[in-house]
Image (tube, rainbow, N blue to C red):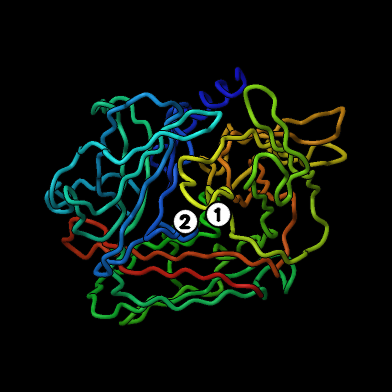
Amino acid sequence: MKRLVVLLLLNLQFSILNYSLAQQSYTFSEHFRSLQVSVDGNKLAPPILTMGKHQHLTIEFDEMSHDYHRLTYHIEHCNADWTPTEGLFESDFLSGFNDQPIEDYENSFNTSQLYTHYRLALPNPETSLLLSGNYRVTIYEDDDRDEPLLQAEFCIVEPSMNIMATISGNTDIDFNESHQQVSYSVNYGANRVVDPLRELHTVVMQNRRQDNKVVDLKPNIQKSNGIEFSYQRALIFPAGNEFHKFEILDVQKPGMNIDNMRWYEPYYHATLYADRPARNYVYDEDRNGGFIMRNDDDGEDNITSEYIWVHFTLQCPRPLPGGDIYVYGHWSNGTSDPDCRMQWNEEAKQYEAAVYLKQGYYNYMYLQENGAAPDGNFYETENEYIILVYHRPQGGRYDKLVGYRSMTTRL
């Protein structure tokens, strides 16, 4: 328990330092876990809504007790770089009321770890959103703005610009070896763009990672009706390898990639089969870092799933150069979450980490501080690439999200 508290306190410190640096969702308190942001119930898709489609965003999380907490949410509109938009009034982007309490919550049932599951849906009878762009929802207790508890970020797109894109293993660095190169073009459609270098902001992400995303790259071709990005070194990504995965549906028996399940008072422990740095590429269907909380009870997963110490092991003959190694997935607090930092065990010749997670299906990979992946890079790897295009026309007061393209490809 002492280790759990220390790790969570470190996590709190890290999250606050990175408050506005990335499109990410964070927990700021050791008492909150399992933050998920989804659109229309799809837990694996990016949290991006499309204007006019009557979609719903859901923010869910657990507070680690059965005590009542009056939690409120505050919504703000953000620029393309996720700094708060200063050119708008709240009434410009929000209809209804801000700073409302979260009234949808339910206590866990028959679990060893007591928790309360909270759920916030947007839009709702009190609040709806009016503009495209980036949004941040911050959760507070009793409207205490000095101590944010959680932060969830999402986007609303008005798809008025068309994005065409390709991904190739034939790059300017190598040919069908270890990299993938993205090329894409943006057609303005009916939008009037006078100065694309000033008016447009672009973002390219691989598997939603923040450490290697490409922002505001200068196009190498400008036309009257659009811009193109091709043969640019900045758009060459290390291809990585397929994500590892595990699933815990029943705490009484091992699931996928689980070596053993144990109960050591007062926690369940799941030990994964040991991983080793890969030497070759082997295709394995994954979800590119995604996760879903669930169990085998066929219902009420949100309140009947257990919390478990999951033990990760990466076996190596010696410590790897390149800095600390982290266990990473969409479920972690950023790319270098202290809660997921691995420790080197000299006697066993392996890296080790224990992370407190809720029952379910998880993808994970190993990442070093310098962005290197111990599992190597293979051009065949199936990755998800996301391209976002923001437009602030001359005289505009905010960054509109006008283009969105998601591609999952296997070369």
Q: Is residue 94 something that shows in the picture? A: yes
Label 2: how many residues lie within 10 Å, few (<14), some (14-19) or many (20+)? some
Q: Which residue shows up at 38% across the image and 58% down it?
A: 39
Q: What residue type is labelled 2?
A: Lys
Q: Residue 395 carries which label?
A: none
Judge from the rendering whether residue 29 lies leftward or rightward of residue 190; answer left or right. right
Q: Is mark 2 on a helix, strand or loop?
A: loop
In percent of width and height, residue 248 lies at 64, 46
Q: Which amino acid does label 1 sit on?
A: Gly
Q: Which mark is residue 43?
A: 2
Label 1: how many residues lie within 10 Å, few (<14), some (14-19) or many (20+)? many
Tell me where residue 337 sits by quadrant.
top right
**On the image, numbered disc 1 is attached to which residue?**
290
Q: Which residue shows up at 85% across the image and 37% down it?
A: 318
In percent of width and height, residue 72 lies at 26, 35
In percent of width and height, residue 346 lies at 84, 28
Judge from the rendering whether residue 292 lies leftward or rightward of residue 400; answer left or right. right
From the image, which quarter does the C terminus lie in?
A: bottom right
In percent of width and height, residue 160 lies at 28, 74
Q: Do the residues labelled 2 and 1 touch (CB within 8 Å)?
A: yes
